[in-house]
Image (cartoon, rainbow, N blue to C red):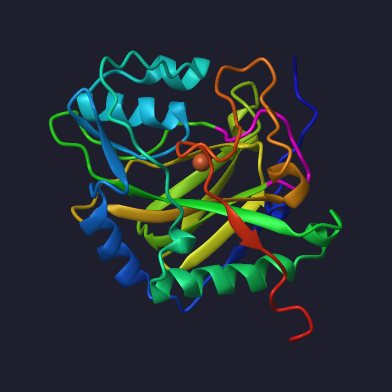
C-alpha cells in the first residue's frame, strides 16, 4: 500500500558548527568502542551493547562478510546467535565527559527552539548511543547501516537524530519506505560538528564509509515523558519491539527538560 507520508527537506532540523569538541568525541569513541561497557561478544564478534536486535544482527553480519541485501529489503535481520554474552546498554549523555555534556546542552537548546516540539505539551527524555563504522576490508566491515527505522508508526513527537563527529565525506538518505520512488528520497550531506534530527519513523541509511579513520556519530532518540513511562510497544505485530523499562538491555534514557527556558 502506498503510504501518504511525504518527505520534505523542511522535515529535518540541522545545526552546523555546533562548536562541540568533535575530535575528542571521535577519538574517544574509537578508543572505547569495544570496552565491555559498550560492546559484548556474540559468537566471537564484538557487538555494540544496543537494544536494537536489527542493528546488532546487522553489525554481526557485516563483520562476518555476509550478504545483507535481503536483510535491508525485507527488514529481516534475523538473530541466529548461539552465544550472547550478557550486556547492558548505555547512554553517552550520562558519561560525565565534557564534550558529551556540551552535546546534551547544545542539542537541548536547539531542540526546544523548535516550536513543533512544544506542541506535545510535555517534557522529553533522551537516549543515545554511538556508532563507529570502519571501512570494509576483504568484504568485511561495519561500514554503514542499511535502511532501517527505529519505530514502526509515525508519532509526531518521537524524534530521532544524530551528531556528526567524524563523517566527511558521507551522506545520509531518508525515505518513507522501499516503495517510495528514489527521486523522492531526501539525501543530506553530513558535516563534522553537525546536528540533525527529525520526527522518527523514516527509514534512513548512511553511505558506505571508505576512509581509514572510522566514521563516528552519536545517535539519539527523544520522546515525550508519557511515552517513556508507559512502556509501550509501538511496533505492533513487529518482532522488533521498541520498548523500554528497567531491564539493563533496554533503554537507559534520562530526562531532557527545557533547561534553557527563559534564557532567550
Ligand atoms: Fe538509525
Give the left or right position of residue 110, taking residue 70 as reference: right
Residue at image coords 65%, 63%:
256
Q: Is residue 226 above or below residue 24?
A: above
Give the left or right position of residue 159, taking residue 145 as reference: right
Which of 177 and 224 lies nearest the eye of the viewer?
A: 224
Q: Is residue 154 magenta?
A: yes
> Where residue 156 appears, x then y in whole percent?
78, 44
> Where residue 78 appears, x then y in whole percent?
41, 15
Magenta region's main secondary structure? loop
> Where residue 74 appears, x then y in whole percent?
51, 15
Residue at image coords 25%, 64%:
27
Outermost bottom residue: 263
Outermost front residue: 246
Figure quadrant of the C terminus:
bottom right
> Where residue 37 appears, x then y in whole percent?
31, 49
The magenta stretch is 149-158
Residue at image coords 77%, 33%:
5
Figure quadrant of the N terminus:
top right
Which of 106 and 257 lies nearest the eye of the viewer?
A: 257
Q: Is residue 210 magenta?
A: no
Q: Is residue 28 above or below residue 248?
A: below
Which of 146 and 85 lies nearest the eye of the viewer?
A: 85
Give the left or right position of residue 150, taking residue 227 as reference: left
Which of 107 and 166 lies nearest the eye of the viewer?
A: 107
Amino acid at each position: 500500500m502506498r503510504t501518504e507520508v511525504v518527505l520534505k527537506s523542511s522535515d529535518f532540523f540541522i545545526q552546523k558548527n555546533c562548536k562541540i569538541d568533535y575530535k575528542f568525541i571521535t577519538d574517544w569513541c574509537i578508543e572505547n568502542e569495544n570496552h565491555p561497557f559498550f560492546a559484548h561478544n556474540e559468537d566471537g564478534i564484538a557487538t555494540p551493547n544496543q537494544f536494537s536486535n536489527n542493528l546488532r544482527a546487522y553489525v554481526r553480519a557485516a563483520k562476518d562478510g555476509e550478504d545483507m541485501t535481503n536483510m535491508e529489503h525485507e527488514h529481516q535481520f534475523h538473530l541466529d546467535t548461539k552465544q550472547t554474552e550478557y550486556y547492558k546498554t548505555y547512554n553517552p549523555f550520562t558519561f560525565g565527559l565534557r564534550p558529551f555534556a556540551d552535546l546534551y546542552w547544545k542539542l537541548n537548546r536547539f531542540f526546544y527552539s523548535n516550536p513543533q516540539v512544544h506542541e506535545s505539551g510535555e517534557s522529553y527524555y533522551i537516549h543515545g548511543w554511538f556508532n563507529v563504522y570502519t571501512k570494509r576490508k576483504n568484504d568485511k566491515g561495519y561500514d554503514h547501516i542499511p535502511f532501517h527505522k527505529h519505530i514502526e508508526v509515525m508519532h509526531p513527537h518521537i524524534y530521532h537524530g544524530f551528531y556528526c563527529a567524524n563523517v566527511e565525506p558521507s551522506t545520509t538518505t531518508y525515505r518513507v519506505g522501499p516503495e517510495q520512488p528514489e527521486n523522492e528520497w531526501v539525501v543530506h550531506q553530513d558535516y563534522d560538528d553537525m546536528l540533525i534530527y527529525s520526527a522518527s519513523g523514516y527509514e534512513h541509511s548512511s553511505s558506505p564509509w571508505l576512509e581509514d579513520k572510522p566514521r563516528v556519530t552519536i545517535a539519539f532518540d527523544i520522546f515525550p515523558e508519557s511515552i517513556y513511562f508507559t512502556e509501550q510497544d509501538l511496533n505492533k505485530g513487529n518482532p522488533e519491539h521498541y520498548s523500554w523499562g528497567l531491564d539493563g538491555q533496554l533503554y537507559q534514557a534520562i530526562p531532557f527538560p527545557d533547561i534553557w527556558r527563559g534564557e532567550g
